[in-house]
Amino acid sequence: MIIGTKMHTCRKCHSNELRKNGINACGNQQYHCKTCGAYGVLEPQVCYTEEAKDLIIKAYQERSSMRGIERSHGICRQTLRAWLKGKNALFLQMHHYA
Ligand SMILES: [Zn+2]
């Protein structure tokens, strides 16, 4: 793991007087701003491209193991669930008309 010296600032007031406030369900570092009292996530969630999304969903459908996909792709379960919801709707539709 690389430990950087990147300075994080509050998204509301841009103060760097932040206190680490644990990690959320997706493994993102959360902060509490000492200046304005805001709570937030230090790093925004990783954005996946459509290609990456498709790849991960395919991998999931082949292996049917959410835990395995989570581990190999470092993806949050909630994110994967949300994608699958969207994809399954499309998938079912396709099969319905096939
Ligand atoms: Zn602040």
Image (cartoon, rainbow, N blue to C red):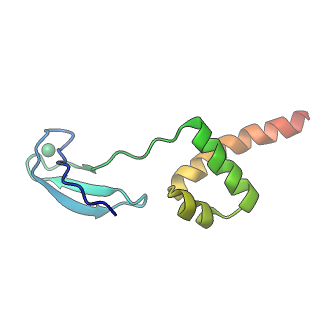
Kindly give the residue lying farthest to the top in the view shown: 97
Residue at 19%, 47% (x, y): give it: 8
Residue placed most toward the observer, 13 or 53: 53
Query: Which of the 4 image quadrants contains residue 96?
Result: top right
Q: Residue 86, percent across and down?
A: 65, 41
Total marks placed: 0
Residue placed most toward the observer, 45 or 71: 71
Kindly give the residue lying farthest to the front in the view shown: 2
Whether residue 38 sits left or right of residue 47 in the image: it is: left
Image quadrant for the C terminus?
top right
Ligand number 1: quarter of image? top left
Residue at 17%, 48% (x, y): give it: 7
Q: Residue 57, percent across and down?
A: 66, 49
Q: Against 95, is 2 above or below?
A: below
Image quadrant for the N terminus?
bottom left
Q: Residue 21, percent across and down?
A: 23, 61
Whether residue 91 sits left or right of residue 32 in the image: it is: right
Residue placed most toward the observer, 16 or 2: 2
Residue at 52%, 54% (x, y): give it: 78
Query: Which of the 4 image quadrants contains residue 19?
Result: bottom left
Residue placed most toward the observer, 62 or 96: 62
Residue at 74%, 37% (x, y): give it: 90
